[in-house]
Image (cartoon, grey):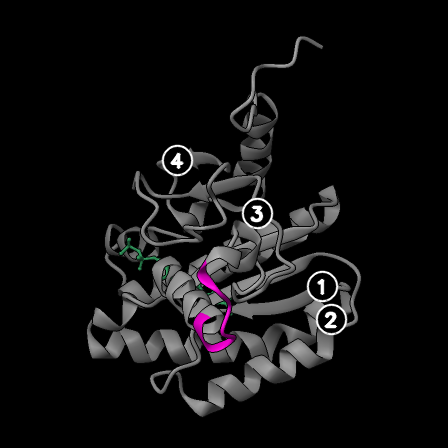
Amino acid sequence: MDGNGRWAQTRGLPRTEGHRAGEHSLFEVVETCDDLGVEWLTVFAFSTENWKRPKDEVSFLINFNEEILIRRRDELHEKNVRVRFVGRRDWRVPKRLIRRMDETLELTQDNTGLTFTIAFNYGGRAEIVDAVRKIVADGTPADKITEKTIARRLYDPEMPDPDLVIRTSGENRISNFLLWELAYSELLFTDTPWPEFGRQSFIDAIHEFQSRDRRFGGVASTG
Ligand code: FPP
C-alpha cells in the first residue's frame, strides 16, 4: 500500500492524511475481493523497517492500525471476512495492539469468506529466520530439511503462495515482502499511489494477471 505519504504531500497535507485516504482504498479492495470471490488478500501494513520512520509517524501508524481494528472489525465480521496477522510479535509492538489483533482474530476465526491477512511488524527475512529458529528448536536433523519443513513454519502455514503481488506508487522493489512465498508470484508494479488505487485499479490488475502466462518453471501449455 505504497505512496500514501507522497500522495498527501503533493496535496499540501500531512503524510498521516495519506494513510487515512489509504484506509478508504484498502476497504474498497477488500470489498472488491469479496465481490469477485478472491479468497486470500494480504496487505503490508507495517514492516520491520518502518520503525526507522520519525517517532511521530510510527506512533500514528500504530494507533491508526489499532483504531482501524476497533472501528472496522464488526463490519469485517458481518462480511464473513476472516482476519489474520503475520509478523513478529516482539517487544516493539504495544501489548494493546496485540490484544486488538487477538480479539479480531478470535471474532472472525470461523468466517468462511475472504481471508484478509494483515502483515504487521513483518519482514520476509525475519519470517525465514523465525522459521529456521523453530526448525532448530524442534531438533530437525539437517538431512530431513526440505522446502516443506520451512513452509510449515512460516507465520501462517495455511496461507497459499500469492498468485499476484501488487506494489503501488512507482516503486519497483519487493522491499522484504513475503520473500519465501512469492517465488512464482506474478508481480505488478503501478505508478498509481495507494490512496487512488481502489476498486477499479484492482479490477484492472486482475485483468492484467489473467493475461499472464504462468509456467512455474515448466513450458507454456499448448491448450
Ligand atoms: C505506505 O505508504 C503505507 C504504510 C506504511 C501504511 C499503510 C497502512 C494502512 C493504510 C492501514 C492498514 C491498517 C490495517 C489495520 C489493515 P508510505 O508512507 O510509505 O508512502 P510514501 O512511499 O509515499 O512515503
Number of marks in the image? 4
Which one is earlier in the sequence, the residue at label 2 or at label 4?
2
- Estimate how packed mark 1 is, as few (under 14), some (14 to 19) or many (20 or more) residues with alpha carbons within 10 Å: many
Residue at the bottom extreme of this rendering = 95
Q: CA distance from mark 1 to mark 2?
A: 6 Å
User: Residue 190 or 119: which is nearer the viewer?
Assistant: 119
Tell me where residue 24 appears, x and y as whole percent.
52, 58
Q: CA distance from mark 4 to mark 1?
A: 27 Å
Mark 2 and mark 1 in contact (Cβ < 8 Å)?
Answer: yes
Q: Residue at x 24, y 55 (%)?
A: 9
**Residue that numbered label 3 is attached to:** 161
- Mark 3, ligand 1, within 8 Å: the answer is no
Q: Residue at x 39, y 58 (%)?
A: 124
As displayed, is residue 28 above or below residue 99?
A: above
**Residue that numbered label 4 is attached to:** 190
Q: Magenta part of the protein: which range?
A: 136-142
**Residue that numbered label 2 is attached to:** 77
**Residue that numbered label 1 is attached to:** 81
Q: CA distance from mark 4 to mark 3?
A: 21 Å
Of badges 3 and 1, nearer the viewer stands 3
Tell me where residue 184 appears, x and y as whole percent.
50, 36
Dot 3 amino acid type: Asp
Dot 1 amino acid type: Val
